[in-house]
Amino acid sequence: LGFAAECLKPKFAVLDPSVTFSLPPRQTANGVVDAFVHVAEQYMTYPVRAQIPDRFSEAVFKTLMEEGPIALEKPDDYDARANIMWAATNGLNRILATGVPQDWVSHAIGHELTAMFGIDHGRTLAVVLPAVYEYEKESKKQKLAQFARRVLGKTGSDDELADVTINETRAFFEKMGTKTHLSDYGIGEDAIPKLVKKLEEHGQTGCGEHHDIGPKEMGEILRLAL
C-alpha cells in the first residue's frame, strides 16, 4: 500500500531518461497512467480560481497524452522519455497541489485492488478513475468540462464536455494498453463486498475533496467499473 514520509524525500534528484529505455511496454504504460492519475487527483475536483496550478496540471496532462503513446511505439525516443519523466516528477512534487482541493479516492480503491488481486498499480487506476468521474460527475462537472476545453480543445456545454472527458480519458488509457474495466481482469460483482470490507478495515472514510466518500460509496464506484 502507499505510504509517505518527509524523511523519504531526497535533497535533490538526478533524472536520466535513458535509464527508462529498457522498460517493458507494460511498465511504461503503468508509469504514464499513474502520473496522469496523480495529476487528476489534484486537479479534477472543483474550481477555486487557482489558475497557476490548474494551468500547470493541464500542461502535464497534455504532455502525458502526447508523449505516452510515442514512448510505447519508440522506447528509445529520448525526448519522449524526458518529457514523461519531467511530467511525472511535476505530477507529484506538490507544486500542482498548491492552493487546490485534492481527491485521492482512485488511489485508495486502486491500492485495495492491487493488494487483493495483484493487479499493477497503474492498471488499477485506469479502471477506477473513469468510474470515479462517472460517480462524481455532478460535483466534478466544472473541472471535467474545463479539462475538455483546455486539454482536449473541445467545445460544448458543461454536461456534454463532462461526458467527453470521461470517454476520452478511458480511450487514452486503452490506447496505452491499460484496460479500463474490472471484467477485463476477471473480477465480478461478487468481489465488491470483499473489497468494501477491506476499505472499512483500513479506515477509508471521509475521502475525496468533499470528505463524503467512504467504503459504501467506493463500492458503488467499483460497480461502475465492472
Image: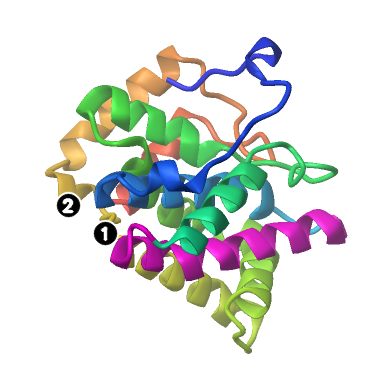
Residue that appears at 63% across and 15% down = 8
Asked where in the image residue 159 lies, by quadrant, the reply is bottom right
Q: Which residue is mark 2?
A: 184
Q: Position of residue 194 (x, y in %)?
A: 26, 24
| Cα distance between the residues tagged 2 and 1 | 12 Å
Tally the numbered discs: 2
The answer to whether any part of residue 176 appears in the image is yes
Near mark 1 (Cα within 10 A), the count class, few <14, some 14-19 or many ≥20, is some
**Given the image, on which type of amino acid does mark 1 rest?**
Gly
Q: Quadrant of the N terminus?
A: top left
Q: Position of residue 117 (x, y in %)?
A: 21, 29
Q: Is 75 included in the stretch rendered in magenta?
A: yes
Query: What range is drawn magenta here?
Result: 48-76
- Name the dominant secondary structure of the magenta segment: helix
Q: Which residue is mark 1?
A: 177
Asked where in the image residue 215 lies, by quadrant, the reply is top left
**Mark 2 or mark 1, which is nearer to you?**
1
In the drawing, what numbered circle is on residue 108? Answer: none
The answer to whether any part of residue 222 appears in the image is no
Near mark 2 (Cα within 10 A), the count class, few <14, some 14-19 or many ≥20, is few
**What secondary structure is found at the residue carrying circle 2?**
helix
**Given the image, on which type of amino acid does mark 2 rest?**
Asp
